[in-house]
Structure formats: structure tokens, C-alpha cells
Amino acid sequence: MRALALLLALGFASALVAQEKHNALVKKEIDDGWLLLFDGESLIGWPEADSKRTKVLEGALVIDNTGAAGAAVLARLLPFDSFEITFDYQIRSPEDRVVLDLGSTISLLRATAKKMLWHAYKGEVTPTRATRGGTPFSISLAKDQVLALRNLKLKPTGLKSIYNGKDLTGWKVFPDKKSKFTVKEGAINIVDGPGDLQTEGKYNNFVLQLEAISHGPGLNSGVFFRCRANEYQNGYEAQINNKYLPAATKEVVVEDYDAKTHALLGKRTIKVAAEDYGTGAIYRRIPASKQAAKDGEWFAMTVVASGNHLSTWVNGIPMVDWHDHRPISDNARKGCKLEAGHISLQGHDPTTNLSFRNFRIAEIAP
């Protein structure tokens, strides 16, 4: 209740923005590759958030440092080398000073008027200024300060196409399987299965963006990555399956490993609405957070692999933010695979009928 009262004290400028939809992307933003860093509902992607000081309230990410002895910090590592970033912020008092650390960029967030309004921040990180292994994003508040954030959006930059839209140059079909791979109207179409279409190149740490469409209800496919050479569908899989239940009643077993020793800590059962992990899941590892794609409609998928940190977005909405703490292995089915491997598209079974287009990738520092 105290946090909600503080929100009301902030004013939140609700009357001024009632007609806007926050923490969402319009179609052009999705097409251009923008991603939400905050979905307006959860702290997915913010593993270092202080649960005592950081809350999700009324569609805003609120950091409340009232009564604390020292500074409060909201932090995460952004696994990108170069990007554009925007967000809205609101500070309770014009005298408050909030420090944003974005790699080598240090900014001071301040209110500029006595009446508390939302303010916009826009920034850009380039490869020459990026921090190796990711770009830190942290916001530091002094004692008794409160900050609200919303519309946190990021657009990866520097991506290059790995598909020419005309033929399968740069790709290879895994032999002796049933799937048929053709190029129709600028898209790679996959029918029948099983089968596997792999990139000739290998990729290790990267940002991959693409578009896909399922031409039938509940069809199954996936985007594999860090695949072992000359082996069939052997890598991590970003799942594609838009079949969801009316409620979160499907039970999925998740394994937890120690980040330092890599020992198995235990297994836990969670309930999800996805019938088969859901589009954007890391298959057999962690289910998608929600449904963001529909059969019969083109959707955008982003996959980011940065060391053992794997993240996915579907239509710009965060699906998975997961660290693979399993023991290191050269086989992603058995452990944490850090080596470069092929990217591949899955033909799952005889019902398979999906299309893919607009593949673009940027390799990032490990």
C-alpha cells in the first residue's frame, strides 16, 4: 500500500496519457526490430532487481528507496554490443538526482518542472563504446528517492542479412530427411518433416532477428542455434508452437543448477498455458513467459546468445531470459554449449508448413 501511495504522490500523469498504450510496440517498431526491456507486468530480464525496493505497479517499474540506509540500484546486463534505447521516467521531486550508467555513458535523470511529469530518455551505444561481454544498464537512487520507469525499448543495431530472399545460398539441407525447403515470395517455406535447413556459417555469440508464420493451427517448428556440425538438430532450440491452453494448467519440469559449481540443485514443476513450451521458449529448458504470436500471422522473433545467457523475444515481448548453469559441454543437449555452431530451421513432422524471412544477425563480443 505504501508503494501505491507513493505512485499516487508521483502523480503518474495518468490523465495526460490515458489514451496511450504503454509498454507495447506498434507494428512498425516490431518490423524495425525494437524490443521491450520491460513488459509492464513482470521483472523478467531483471534478475538483479531488489525485490524489496523494486515493484511493478500500474504498468510501471517502480524503484522505491524510501527509508533505506543507502543507495538503491536497478541493474541488468544488456547482451548487446550496439543499440538504441528509449524509456520514460518520472521522479518524485525536482531536487532528486538519479544516475543512469549505460556502459561508458553516464547520465543524470532529473525532473525539470515542479509538477511531476513523465520525461523521455533516448540514448545510443556503439561498438566502440560497448563493454565487452555486454553493456551494463544500472540506475542508482539516493536515500528516500523514488523512480518510475515505463516504455523501456531497445533496438539492436549493426545487424546484417544472412538470407538473400531469392534462393538458399548460404544454407544447406541436412541429407536424407523428408522436409522440403523452397523459396516462395521471398520467404523460405518448409513443408513435411522431419528435416533440417542449416546455415553454412557458424555463430557463437549473436543477436538474431527473423520473421516466421505458421500456416496451420498448432504446428511445430523451431530455430536451432550453436548446432554441432554434421549432426541433425543438435543445438539449443528457440521453440515455435503457438498452441496454448485456456489457463496455466500444463506442468513443465525445470532444472536448477548452481551458477558456480554447476551442480544440479533440484527440479521443480511449474504450470504454464503453453501446450509445448510455447513460441520463444528454449525447448526442454525454460518455457515462454506468455503467448505473443498467433498461427496464420507473421511474427518477429529475436534470439540473443551471449555466453551462457540466452534471451528471446516474440513480437518484441520478452519470452525468456535464462542462464545455462549446466556443466560446460560441446553438446547443448547435455550441457552448456559455448562454442560456435550452425543456425538451423526445423521441419518437425508431416504436418509442418511454415515460412521464414528477413534473417539478420550481428555477432557480439563473448
Image (cartoon, helix red, strand yellow):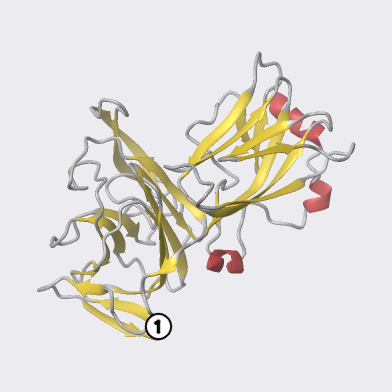
Q: Which quarter of the figure is the C terminus placed in?
A: top left
- x and y percentages locating residue 19 in the rendered image: 77, 57
Q: Is 232 positioned to the left or the right of 50 in the image?
A: left
The residue under label 1 is which amino acid type?
A: Gly
Q: Is residue 145 above or below residue 152?
A: above
Residue 217 drawn at (x, y percent): 36, 70
- Farthest front residue? 128
Determine whether 216 is above or below 301 in the image. Answer: below
Answer above or below: position of 359 versus 80.
below
55 or 77: nearer the viewer: 77
Q: Quick one: which residue is furthest to the right in this view?
A: 114
Mark 1 packing: few (<14 Cα in 10 Å), some, or many (20+)? some
x, y percentage for residue 364? 41, 52
Residue at the outermost top position: 69
Q: How many labels, in total?
A: 1
Task: Name the residue rendered at 67%, 52% in the picture.
Answer: 22
In this view of the protein, which residue sits in the foreground, 22 or 275?
A: 22
Viewer can see residue 275: yes
The residue labelled by disc 1 is: 186
Name the residue rendered at 73%, 38% in the picture: 109
**Res. 154 in view:** no
Q: Which structural element holds mark 1?
A: loop
Q: Nearer the viewer, residue 304 or 252?
A: 304
Q: Is residue 352 left or right of residue 117?
A: left
Q: Quadrant of residue 133?
A: top left
Q: Residue at x 30, y 53 (%)?
A: 204
Relative to 222, 52 lies left or right: right
Q: Quadrant of the N terminus?
A: top right
Q: Can you say whether 115 is above or below 17 in the image?
A: above
Residue shown at 17%/46% (left/top)? 330
Image coords of residue 178 (percent x, y): 15, 75
